[in-house]
Image (tube, rainbow, N blue to C red):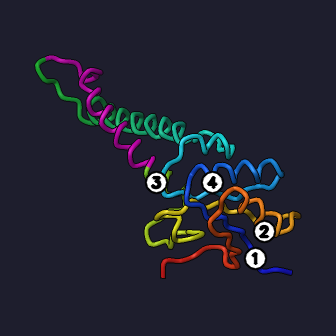
Amino acid sequence: MSNTKFILGLFDDPDDMMQGIDNLQKNSIPIYDVYTPMPIHGIEAKMGVKDSRLGYAAFCFGCLGGTVIFSMIYYMLVHDWPMNVGGKPSFAIPNFVPFTFEWTILFTAFGMTITFFAATHLFPGRAPRVMDLRATDDRFVIAVSAKGNVPHEDITNLLKQAGAVEVKHNERKYVSYE
């Protein structure tokens, strides 16, 4: 049995890589992931990537921030230490708006940062997971899991037909920056 975990097709041109994705999908070969040095328009739809749910998390963090500061201000200015300033009421909602707005933004920003790091496993100090180091520089990489039922030679031929400059068989899962 082979130790190969991934078959990598390295491309010079994004159009050739898109052709490689089409070739693999026509032959029902599942693609593990695609690595590119720049964003490519339309690749999410072609790969079947779903829309992000980070917007829902942002809304929840904003609601949490607004609720926390509104509750704090209400407790502090109405129950704990009510002050009579010129006969104005202690519970004047227009006075609460700036603080509520700012804390809503603050909780959303910090919450989204933490959520993004948790979702992408990009915590500080963690080694990045890179299939091929040239994918961050000038190569477009298609990674295909080698554990399928399709022979490796067929996958290699499909990638080369699409214009792959190089086809590699990775034995390790990821390359480190050491």
Name the residue that disc number 3 marks. 114
Give the percent coordinates (x, y) of residue 46: 67, 43
Measured in 3D between alpha carbons, the distance from the residue under mark 4 to the one under mark 2, in whole angstroms, is 19 Å
Q: Which badge, 4 or 1, comes first in the chain's sequence?
A: 1
What is the span of residues highlighted in magenta in the rendered image? 87-112
Query: Tag 2: residue type?
Result: Ala
Residue at position x 45%, y 47% in the image = 112
Magenta region, main secondary structure: helix
Q: Is residue 97 in the magenta section?
A: yes
Between circles 2 and 3, the one closer to the viewer is 2
Give the percent coordinates (x, y) of residue 104: 37, 36
Residue at disc 3, secondary structure: helix
Measured in 3D between alpha carbons, the distance from the residue under mark 3 to the one under mark 4, in whole angstroms, is 33 Å
Name the residue that disc number 2 marks. 146
Between circles 4 and 1, the one closer to the viewer is 4
Name the residue that disc number 4 marks. 17
Q: Is residue 106 left or right of residue 29?
A: left
Measured in 3D between alpha carbons, the distance from the residue under mark 4 to the one under mark 1, in whole angstroms, is 22 Å
Q: Which badge, 1 or 3, comes first in the chain's sequence?
A: 1
Q: Which badge, 3 or 4, comes first in the chain's sequence?
A: 4
Measured in 3D between alpha carbons, the distance from the residue under mark 1 to the one under mark 3, in whole angstroms, is 35 Å
Between circles 4 and 2, the one closer to the viewer is 4
